[in-house]
Amino acid sequence: MPRPCPSPLFAALALALACTGNMVGERPDPSRDAGPAPTGDAGSPSTDAGSPTEDAGSPTPTADAGSPTEDAGSPTEDAGSPMPSDPLTFAEVDGLVAVEAEHYVRIENEEDREWVRFDAMDAPSIEPDPDPPHLEGAAGGAYLENLPDTRATMDDPIEHGVSFHPNGGTGPMLTYRVRFETPGTYVVWVRAYSTGTEDNGIHAGIDGTFPGSGERVQWCAGKHQWTWSSAQRTTSNHCGTPGTITLDVDSAGVHEIHFSLREDGFEFDKFVLALDAGFEPSGEGPAEVLAD
């Protein structure tokens, strides 16, 4: 209820203060009109309200999600830099491994050519590069290309050790980390986009070596589209025979898988290692699985 006004004997100032309900020196209580204080449900940086935590807008994928984690080079906010801050380790499950090309742990030997990432946010301009980007159909929406591409046709000059590397491990090399549960001989399948006769070769290796069985992965069929190959080019068969690119995993545990340049302009999307010699990937292939 309103406070009753005192008698007219009080001074006008005292009368006015008494009628307002405040005593001399008393400050208004700001809580009366401020409304309730904000809580976690009203914009507070809590786990449930937009905080950059695991539960708020940037969920960390699990091993079953087939995507690397945010802290380890996932193609999300770190998309412009495929080099992860911590090594990515993928898992072999039931004799099968799948890894996106852009999810490497390191690159070496890039003195004259480099592996460049293409995705929806970034299409690097490195000349010469006779081909436009080929993002449509690329697994995970990204791929790597080795540039510059100075030997696009047989009429272009060849530079051994620069635009062409006949042996594995001498050119720009990508390394991936895989944890195997099952040792054995794995067939190597690589998904690539080849537009000509001089951009269709790469080498595969393991644990710092490039055995003869992993060299010269070749593409003849499936031009101008993303195509899987496990065929090895030989002197007698330039197009190779499917299923002839293999790597031997001699023990369970973490091993490094390498891919090094054979021909510049090579566009590399994904690789699969299959213990079953009869397995052949299709489409974008199996999903990646991170090791626990």
Image (spheres, helix red, strand yellow):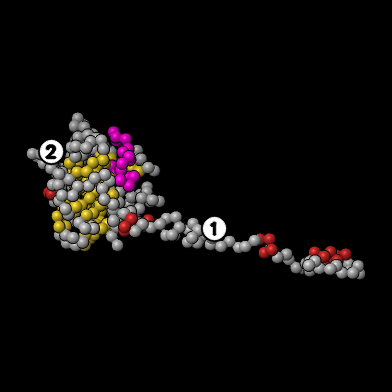
Residue 9 among those drawn in magenta: no
Q: Does residue 115 appear in the picture of this structure?
A: no
Quarter of the image where the N terminus is located: bottom right
Kindly identify the amino acid type of the residue bearing the numbered disc 1: Gly
Region in magenta:
128-146
Residue 47 left/right relative to 263 = right
Quarter of the image where the C terminus is located: bottom left
Task: Point out residue 95 in the picture as x, y percentages from the top left corner.
Answer: 20, 56
- Is 51 above or below relative to 151? below
Task: Please tell me how crowded label 2 is: few (under 14), some (14-19), or many (20+) other residues with Cα within 10 Å.
Answer: some
Q: Which mark is residue 238?
A: 2
Residue 24 left/right relative to 100 = right
Q: Residue furthest right?
A: 9
Q: Which residue is mark 1?
A: 43
Residue 29 left/right relative to 247 = right
Residue 120 occupies which quadrant of the picture?
top left
Identify the secondary structure beneath mark 1.
Answer: loop
Task: Point out residue 186 in the picture as x, y percentages from the top left corner.
Answer: 16, 53
Task: Please tell me how crowded label 1 is: few (under 14), some (14-19), or many (20+) other residues with Cα within 10 Å.
Answer: few
Task: Point out residue 203 in the picture as x, y percentages from the top left corner.
Answer: 18, 46
Residue at image x 28%, y 49%? Answer: 100
Identify the secondary structure beneath mark 2.
Answer: loop
Between marks 2 and 1, how big is the CA–CA gap? Answer: 63 Å
- Is 101 above or below relative to 7? above
